[in-house]
């Protein structure tokens, strides 16, 4: 069974994925509400479209960082599949380093934009939320992407041929199901009367 420490580590290692999931669910709910309101009740809300765009930006930049951790970022696997182990590892590490350098370069320019936004103090037209918050979030996700890339380089350097570069799903439903079964079996082993009552 997982301990609280393991759950905390899991959330820390994938928290951008969870933020992206929340943003995705928010966009789905509010846009569905907007469609129903517009075509069924003849009424729409301007704040929904504005916040949906913000949610979409959040989703995209969470994906930039999360894709590194789960190895879902785009790459040409055809080349990697035909080269030997050591050149393949070198190419994958180089690819991750280039991603980190590009994210760091974008972070620098995003920092310059944030400085300008602090002077301009622009806000969104409907919600009146300061635009700088979104730009700060983008910068944080880009910096986090650099950190994730460094973590990925360390992992790749340690991996052997049979496991090199294998993608890891953000939400492994099979693993969650198997863990649930183990927890249930352990509980029933400790409390056999619970299993008997369930079978009645």
Image (tube, rainbow, N blue to C red):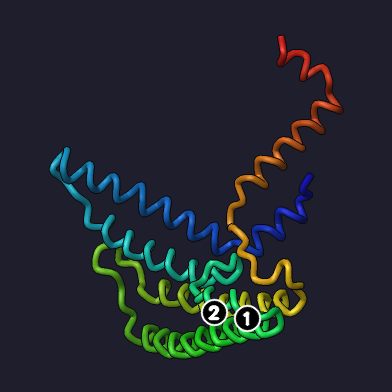
Q: Position of residue 152 (x, y in %)?
A: 66, 75
Nearest the eye: 76 or 188: 76
How far, Cα to Cα, is label 1 from label 2? 7 Å
The structure residue drawn at horizontal position 42% and vertical position 77%, both measured from the top left corner, is: 135
The structure residue drawn at horizontal position 55% and vertical position 64%, both measured from the top left corner, is: 16
| Other residues around mark 2 within 10 Å, as few (<14) / some (14–19) / many (≥20) | few
Q: Quadrant of residue 174?
A: top right
Q: Quadrant of the N terminus?
A: top right
Q: Which residue is identified by label 2? A: 79
For this orientation, the residue located farthest to the left is 42
Q: Quadrant of the C terminus?
A: top right
Nearest the eye: 137 or 94: 94
Q: Position of residue 140 (x, y in %)?
A: 52, 76
Nearest the eye: 178 or 89: 89
Q: Position of residue 179 (x, y in %)?
A: 72, 42
Q: Which residue is identified by label 1? A: 83
The structure residue drawn at horizontal position 49% and vertical position 55%, both measured from the top left corner, is: 21
Q: Position of residue 151 (x, y in %)?
A: 68, 76
Q: Are marks 1 and 2 in contact (CB under 8 Å)?
A: yes
Side of 144 relative to 47 (left or right): right
Q: Secondary structure at mark 2?
A: helix
Q: Secondary structure at mark 1?
A: loop
Question: Residue 121: which disc?
Answer: none
Q: Quadrant of residue 184?
A: top right
């Amino acid at each position: 069974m997982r301990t609280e420490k393991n759950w905390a580590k899991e959330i820390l290692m994938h928290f951008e994925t969870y933020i992206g999931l929340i943003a995705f669910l928010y966009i789905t709910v509010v846009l569905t509400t907007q469609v129903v309101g517009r075509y069924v009740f003849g009424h729409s809300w301007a704040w929904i479209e504005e916040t949906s765009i913000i949610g979409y930006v959040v989703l995209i930049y969470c994906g930039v960082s999360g894709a590194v951790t789960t190895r879902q970022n785009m790459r040409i696997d055809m080349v990697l599949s035909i080269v030997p182990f050591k050149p393949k590892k070198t190419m994958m590490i180089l690819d991750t380093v280039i991603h980190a350098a590009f994210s760091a370069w974008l972070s620098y320019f995003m920092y310059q934009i944030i400085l300008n936004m602090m002077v301009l103090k622009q806000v969104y037209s409907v919600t009146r939320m300061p635009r700088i918050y979104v730009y700060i979030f983008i910068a944080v996700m880009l910096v986090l992407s650099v950190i994730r890339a460094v973590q990925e380089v360390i992992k790749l350097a340690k991996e052997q041929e049979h496991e090199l570069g294998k993608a890891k799903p953000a939400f492994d439903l099979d693993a969650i199901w198997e863990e649930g079964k183990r927890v249930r079996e352990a509980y029933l082993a400790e409390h056999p009367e619970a299993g008997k009552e369930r079978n009645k």
